[in-house]
Image (cartoon, rainbow, N blue to C red):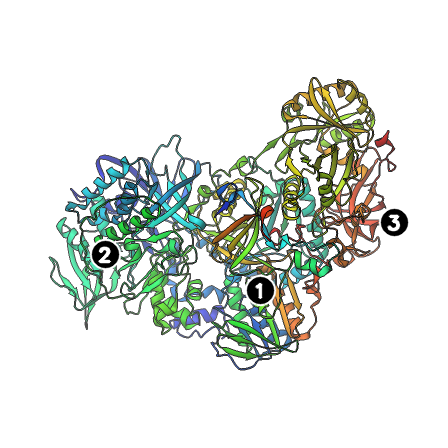
């Protein structure tokens, strides 16, 4: 079924009785050409591009819960391409281009809105670091504009320019940065993949990975064994557990990142705003809620919930930066489980087991990467070769020292 | 309408307030909702999506409809629950989410478009043409969405945060909570009793009854009096426990001043962090609506709320009330109304076998299938078998049974259990360690059940605390709670489940039809449960409708997760203290005032404030001052406060051995009285920090770190020591704040230093010696960060300011003076000294040309990981100097002249830049691929952001005095 | 969240700094192959369940602690000083 304004009107006139399921609910087959473990954003996008770009349609996505139940359903929805290290730069640039065509590609309105991202800086040193970043963005072909304090004031007049502990020196504006409706991204890719013949199998937990003679031959699941010569592990938040089924130990530690949404408010914040001194970022959703977050809780955890110290720290950052939000009330908080890697950058690579691929380590930047991650993982699984824009995301780069450490904080997983 | 003789309001204290521009009167003890209902105001808001007229539904914080803006003298507060906000003299409130007046809201047109605005419609349209989404559709949607408004002005309100500790935290003060608090309180345990409302008693205040032979109100008064008299019991009114966190920690919001017109010295709200040994959850239960066609009109309310307004506030929400309920208990509302003289026009009970004799018409086996009244209920349509009829009524009290208030038990991922008997979810035992749910919150619906479970839980806690108590359980009603689940009445029209987000049974069914069958999918697709009430009024019914639509049982369908906070909490309350300078500590130098006295602008350096430059009359830009200060140091003498550098005192027999382990170079061989520059790596081989360490005695070193890494290095040293060499005889402590330290640099530095030492000393370069200044023991180091002959003098902090003023005064007599961060930065760039602009966490000793400082003779932290192949070779960017005649900038990237500028041709970047008055050129430090091999070549420096494109010369990073002759002079 | 420091007693999480898994205690010997360093610095078991990790009582006694902790429930079942640990 193709979606359109006309379709909404005609269905509305006839009691909305004609809508059909957005995807099928198939039973698993005994064998597929390829299996994707994980029905989150990255897994669904991989399935979609395997089918669309590589014509591989006899594939299944295995999801232990319901599709989109991981971090794609729990994030602050920021979409940007503002990295500065070669290796990251071209990847996120590619991703942003895919975002810009996602609605037409998926026939699904994911409400991607390029409302502009402003990274604020609060010292000469921070400014120089952001200038370096901004120049890298432009060298890559993306956009960046340096704002001085008055330039920031024009965009964000409600910030506290007078009293704040760390005065605002200026900001780096990334006009093509913005936000999107996170669940819709999962649903859009799911529907697109399903329409191309991909089996989306929900409530199907993988319990083992079958390997023979160094080659993957299939998986064990709560719904029986399924054979496949290619298996992709795309389960950020649970990567270590699934990789352990193949005897692998990953360079990942799982951490909690909390996020918050307020009650609905009339439009008051039009950009995505990021505070350079407090690890605080905020935007306003189309429904009117202020969506914001901060840093990790900092201890390894799989609890999908956080504790008060970071909650309060995030609120304090909001109050020093933009005290006009003080009377907005936090409606809900949640915690996502982050695959933290030792350099803050992801992994899309083959493994030492033939036919087994892994896409993980997204730290807390996975949402914006969904389309390019799917694109590149599909390329890798279909061709056996890394895609040009993801060739630095190697699994062995920590051992060899070819690191992608944007934060410069080194081999401590929670500092990225 | 107000009912004489009823309610707990203080009729001797009338209160005037304003709503939507009109003045009304209420009484002290009223909420805004009760006072509006007393004035026969039924229409109080507009719904989120369809802008339907809405009235008060509940009498508590779960209210989905009656959300208003409270207008203060300086600011406004959106989305205030009228059912919670107490009226006070001068309260001004207004309705929200309307375009035009509340009665004639232009956006009510959405209601007519409802067929096209069904679940998820926006995912299927607004896609073409692409530019229209951001240009047209989205702005329209954003304007229509949202509820109340923020003013955009800074919130200048006062908020607080506080910690509290107790043995037993009791949440809720109904019969279960009071009984638990009394039991624990009498045992002598530290008890906190937190009650969301403004008085203790819970449902007893609304429902009455008899406890221990006393009218419930009297029993409450007796218990409250005893609790108030117990010194170990703290009663916290207007306090909602908002979240359960790890290890007995709870968040709670106290509305401290929001009910007062003037609040001198009182914060608006206080956010509490309560640490409890044991917790009793006695938060009661929430009555749930029934979905039937047009069940959302003003005048349709929860039956328990109607009873609360009558008995607690002396208000009848209607003059001709009807009741639609599926429990016996709900009948009490009708009986109380009739006893108070209010007409009850009929009771509609869907249970065919229900009790049918009341003092009003009773329709058993009947259902409400429709309602009338544009801005308020005027009639309901009832179906009984094949027959339908209308009843005129201005208030319909409805009840679909009760949902235990289990939210806190889910905050730590506990999944509730479905109880078929109650047709509700009940807490899973042990879901929150240390927390026990009692009373209605745990499904014990009778007063006796509440008292008994509260009593029993508290007894177990008292016992666990090793205390004893003797307390009798008072007698009370123990009627069984029976219902036949009724979630939605069959019908063709729209029947609301989620009033706040305008989600109807049709939306849920459509979601299931489109494959959104998981409860999380349904929630996210329809937005049910995502509104300000977080599904408190709708989750269970929506789940039941979904279960029905997908042919599954409720337990099998599952449940969405409740997450903190239980009620929405203002950002200002949880962020109290963060405003303005409160966000982070401020660290001030001992010379701070002296610097400010000289007009120096102070800038942030981490948590410190340091002088940027010291302006002189006639200087109009910072650059003029900076150039002068640089020249002053190069030609005469300058004084700078360098106390922000981290200082770690290290002592013990193995101190040298320890430094050898944490530094790349060797310190154990350093002679006493000498100082050495040291390089420290992280274990992954990257540069962690640099600085000097001085050997003050045989087993005594003083380490200096950079300002930025002071804390980091201390933590690192503690780790290395405790993890790898705990048995070594070495101890260390941070003395950063114990010593004030000043750099004196320039050709006249020695003359200046010797002018105030009691005994002048001749120190070699990189020497250290104890000295005395004006009777004070001090330390003198001959070290330099400027490239000139330089000294640093350290005195105990309390003498810092005096010494700084004295040094500056002496320097000025010699043609010198103080210099600030800007000059300090130019001086160190001229000399090629690095800071954290260069050692930014991605550079190795090799990258900065210091690989020879990594001793081959010993093991040290980071040495081995630095040998990874990716950290060596010409592909790496290496530290170089850059020189240009035109202005250049930090953050620019480097390219080979004549090549295109893009990522693939990028050769490096610039980290630090300054105009060098000494060299008469712009100088920079930066990183360039294979840079050391390219010294003498030209590179193109491009800064798109600032429009700079300049050819530079690649240089040795040490521009000034490369042989170090001045240092050693 | 609260931690019981063996020296200072029951304290709020705000007083502590978190490093990571206790793997960081098992530093490879001098001259160990680079694979050992990869294991030491990067690769982690990262269990969903009981783990041992390193906390630093930064705003207390400056002691590094090995905490036995469940990463799913956050239950803490043991705390010992790094400097006095057994094995």
Residue A239: give its label: 1
Distance in Å between CA atoms under marks 2 and 3: 87 Å
Q: Do the residues bearing badges 3 and 1 touch, measured as CB atoms within 8 Å?
A: no
Residue B579 in the image: state x and y as whole percent. Answer: 51, 38
Distance in Å between CA atoms under marks 2 and 1: 52 Å
**Quick one: SS at disc 2?**
strand
**Quick one: SS at disc 3?**
loop
In the picture, measured across the screen, residue B123 lies left or right of residue B350, that is right
Do the dots labelled 3 and 1 sit on one chain?
no
Q: Is residue B514 above or below residue C58?
A: below
B874 or A247: which is nearer to us? A247
Residue A332: give its label: none
Q: Nearer the viewer, mark 2 or mark 1?
A: 1
Residue C38 in the image: state x and y as whole percent. Answer: 68, 59
Residue B937: give its label: 3
B620 or B867: which is nearer to us? B867
Residue B397: give its label: 2
Identify the image quadrant of residue A234.
bottom right
Residue A395 in the image: state x and y as whole percent. Answer: 67, 64
């Amino acid at each position: 079924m193709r979606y359109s304004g006309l379709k909404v009107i005609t269905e509305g006139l006839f009691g909305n009785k004609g809508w059909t399921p957005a995807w099928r609910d198939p039973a698993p087959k005994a064998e597929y050409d390829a299996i994707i473990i994980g029905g989150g954003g990255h897994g669904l996008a991989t399935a979609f591009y395997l089918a669309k770009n590589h014509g591989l349609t006899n594939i299944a996505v295995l999801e232990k819960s319901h599709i989109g139940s991981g971090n794609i359903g729990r994030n602050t929805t920021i979409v940007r391409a503002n990295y500065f290290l070669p290796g990251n730069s071209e990847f996120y640039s590619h991703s942003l281009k895919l975002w810009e065509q996602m609605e037409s590609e998926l026939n699904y309105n994911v409400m991607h809105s390029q409302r502009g991202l402003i990274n604020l800086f609060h010292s000469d040193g921070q400014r120089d670091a952001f200038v370096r970043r901004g120049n890298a963005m432009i060298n890559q072909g993306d956009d960046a504009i340096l704002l001085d304090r008055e330039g920031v004031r024009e965009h964000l007049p409600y910030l506290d320019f007078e009293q704040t502990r760390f005065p605002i020196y200026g900001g780096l504006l990334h006009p093509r940065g913005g936000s999107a409706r996170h669940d819709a991204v999962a649903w859009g890719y799911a529907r697109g993949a399903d329409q191309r013949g991909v089996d989306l199998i929900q409530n199907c937990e993988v319990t083992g990975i079958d390997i023979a003679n160094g080659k993957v031959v299939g998986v064990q699941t709560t719904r029986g064994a399924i054979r496949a010569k290619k298996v992709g592990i795309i389960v950020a938040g649970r990567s270590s557990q699934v990789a352990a089924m193949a005897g692998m130990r990953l360079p990942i530690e799982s951490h909690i990142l909390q996020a918050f949404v307020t009650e609905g408010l009339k439009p008051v914040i039009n950009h995505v705003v990021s505070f350079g001194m407090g690890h605080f970022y905020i935007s306003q959703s189309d429904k009117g809620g202020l969506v914001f977050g901060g840093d990790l809780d900092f201890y390894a955890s799989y609890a999908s919930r956080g504790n008060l110290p970071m909650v309060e720290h995030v609120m304090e950052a909001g109050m020093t930066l933009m005290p006009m939000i003080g009377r907005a009330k936090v409606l809900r908080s949640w915690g996502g489980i982050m695959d933290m890697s030792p350099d803050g950058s992801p992994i899309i690579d083959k493994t030492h087991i033939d036919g087994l691929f892994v896409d993980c380590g997204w730290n807390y930047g996975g949402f914006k990467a969904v389309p390019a991650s799917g694109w590149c993982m599909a390329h890798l699984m279909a061709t056996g070769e890394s895609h040009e824009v993801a060739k630095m995301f190697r699994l062995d780069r920590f051992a060899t020292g070819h690191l992608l450490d944007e934060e410069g904080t080194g081999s401590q997983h929670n500092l990225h | 309408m107000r009912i004489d003789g009823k309610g707990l309001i203080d009729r001797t204290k009338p209160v005037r307030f304003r709503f939507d521009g009109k003045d009304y009167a209420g009484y002290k003890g009223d909420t805004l909702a009760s006072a509006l209902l007393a004035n026969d105001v039924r229409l109080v808001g507009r719904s989120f999506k369809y802008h339907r007229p809405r009235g008060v539904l509940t009498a508590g914080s779960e209210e989905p409809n009656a959300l208003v803006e409270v207008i203060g003298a300086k600011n406004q507060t959106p989305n205030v629950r009228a059912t919670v906000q107490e009226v006070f003299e001068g309260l001004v409130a207004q309705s929200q989410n309307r375009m035009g007046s509340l009665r004639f809201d232009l956006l009510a047109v959405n209601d007519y478009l409802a067929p096209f605005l069904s679940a998820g419609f926006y995912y299927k349209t607004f896609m073409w043409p692409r530019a229209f989404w951001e240009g047209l559709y989205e702005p329209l949607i954003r304007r229509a969405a949202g509820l109340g408004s923020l003013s955009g002005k800074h919130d200048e309100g006062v908020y607080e945060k506080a910690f509290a500790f107790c043995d037993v935290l009791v949440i809720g003060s109904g019969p279960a909570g009071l009984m638990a608090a009394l039991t624990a309180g009498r045992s002598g345990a530290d008890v906190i009793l937190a009650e969301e409302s403004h008085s203790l008693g819970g449902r007893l205040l609304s429902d009455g009854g008899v406890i221990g032979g006393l009218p419930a109100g009297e029993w409450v008064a007796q218990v409250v009096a005893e609790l108030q008299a117990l010194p170990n019991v703290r009663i916290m009114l207007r306090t909602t426990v908002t979240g359960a966190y790890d290890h007995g920690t709870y968040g709670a919001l106290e509305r401290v001043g929001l009910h007062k017109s003037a609040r001198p010295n009182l914060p608006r709200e206080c956010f509490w962090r309560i640490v409890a040994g044991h917790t009793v959850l006695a938060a009661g239960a929430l009555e749930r609506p029934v979905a039937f066609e047009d069940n959302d009109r003003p005048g349709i309310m929860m039956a328990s709320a109607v009873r609360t307004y009558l008995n607690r506030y002396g208000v009848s929400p209607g003059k001709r009330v009807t009741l639609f309920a599926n429990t016996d208990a709900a009948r009490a509302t009708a009986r109380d109304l009739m006893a108070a003289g209010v007409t009850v026009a009929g009771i509609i009970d869907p249970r065919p076998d229900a009790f049918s004799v009341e003092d009003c018409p009773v329709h058993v086996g009947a259902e409400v299938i429709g309602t009338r009244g544009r801005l308020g209920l005027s009639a309901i349509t009832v179906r009984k078998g094949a027959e339908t009829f209308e009843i005129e009524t201005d208030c319909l009290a409805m009840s679909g049974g009760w949902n235990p208030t289990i939210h806190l038990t889910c905050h730590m991922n506990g999944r509730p259990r479905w109880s078929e008997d109650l047709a509700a979810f009940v807490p899973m035992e042990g879901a929150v360690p240390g927390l026990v749910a009692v009373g209605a919150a745990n499904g014990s619906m009778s007063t006796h059940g509440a008292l008994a479970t509260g009593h029993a839980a508290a007894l177990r806690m008292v016992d666990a605390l090793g205390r004893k108590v003797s307390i009798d359980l008072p007698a009370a009603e123990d009627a069984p709670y029976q219902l036949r689940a009724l979630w939605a009445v069959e019908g063709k029209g729209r029947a609301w489940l989620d009033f706040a987000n305008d989600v109807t049974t049709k939306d849920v069914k459509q979601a299931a039809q489109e494959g959104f069958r998981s409860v999380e999918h349904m929630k996210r697709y329809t937005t049910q449960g995502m509104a300000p009430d977080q599904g408190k009024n709708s989750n269970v019914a929506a789940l039941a409708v979904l279960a029905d639509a997908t042919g599954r049982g409720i337990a099998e369908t599952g449940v969405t997760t409740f997450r903190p906070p239980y009620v929405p909490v203002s950002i200002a309350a949880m962020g109290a203290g963060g405003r303005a300078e409160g966000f982070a500590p401020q660290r001030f130098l001992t010379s701070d005032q002296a610097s400010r006295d000289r007009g120096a602008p102070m800038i942030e350096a981490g948590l410190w404030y340091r002088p940027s430059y010291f302006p002189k009359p006639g200087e109009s830009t910072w650059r003029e001052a900076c150039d002068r200060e640089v020249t002053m140091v190069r030609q005469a003498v300058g004084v700078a406060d360098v106390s922000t550098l981290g200082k770690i005192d290290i002592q013990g027999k193995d101190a040298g051995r320890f430094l050898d382990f944490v530094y790349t170079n060797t310190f154990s061989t350093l002679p006493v009285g000498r100082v050495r520059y040291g390089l420290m790596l992280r274990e992954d081989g990257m540069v962690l920090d640099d600085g000097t360490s001085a050997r003050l005695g045989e087993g005594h070193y003083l380490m200096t770190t950079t300002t930025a890494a002071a804390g980091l290095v201390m933590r690192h040293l503690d780790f290395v020591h405790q993890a790898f060499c705990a048995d070594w005889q070495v101890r260390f402590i941070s003395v950063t704040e114990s010593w004030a330290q000043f750099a004196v640099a320039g050709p006249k530095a020695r003359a200046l230093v010797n002018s105030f030492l009691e005994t002048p000393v001749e120190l070699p370069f990189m020497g250290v010696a104890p000295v005395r200044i004006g009777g004070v023991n001090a330390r003198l180091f001959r070290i330099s960060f400027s490239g000139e002959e330089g000294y640093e003098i350290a005195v105990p902090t309390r003498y810092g300011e005096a010494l700084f003023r004295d040094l500056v005064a002496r320097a000025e007599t010699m043609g010198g003076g103080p210099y600030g961060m800007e000059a300090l930065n130019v001086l160190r760039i001229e000399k090629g000294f690095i800071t954290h602009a260069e050692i930014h966490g991605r550079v190795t000793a090799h990258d900065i040309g210091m690989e020879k400082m990594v001793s081959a003779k010993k093991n040290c932290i980071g040495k081995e990981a630095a040998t990874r192949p990716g950290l060596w070779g010409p592909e790496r960017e290496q530290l170089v100097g850059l020189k240009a005649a035109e202005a250049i900038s930090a953050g620019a990237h480097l390219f080979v002249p004549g090549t295109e500028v893009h990522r693939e041709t990028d050769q490096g970047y610039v980290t630090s830049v300054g105009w060098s008055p000494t060299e008469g050129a712009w100088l920079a430090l930066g990183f360039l691929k294979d840079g050391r091999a390219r010294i003498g070549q030209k590179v193109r420096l491009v800064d798109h952001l600032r429009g700079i494109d300049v050819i530079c010369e690649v240089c040795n990073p040490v521009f000034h005095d490369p042989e170090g002759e001045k240092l050693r002079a | 969240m609260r931690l019981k420091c063996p020296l200072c007693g029951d304290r709020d999480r705000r007083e502590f700094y978190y490093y990571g898994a206790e793997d960081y205690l098992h530093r490879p010997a001098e001259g160990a192959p680079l694979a050992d360093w990869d294991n030491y610095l990067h690769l982690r078991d990262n269990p969903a369940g009981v783990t041992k990790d390193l906390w630093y009582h930064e705003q207390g006694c400056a002691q590094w602690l090995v905490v036995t902790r469940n990463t799913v429930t956050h239950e803490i079942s043991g705390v010992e000083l790094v400097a006095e640990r057994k094995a």
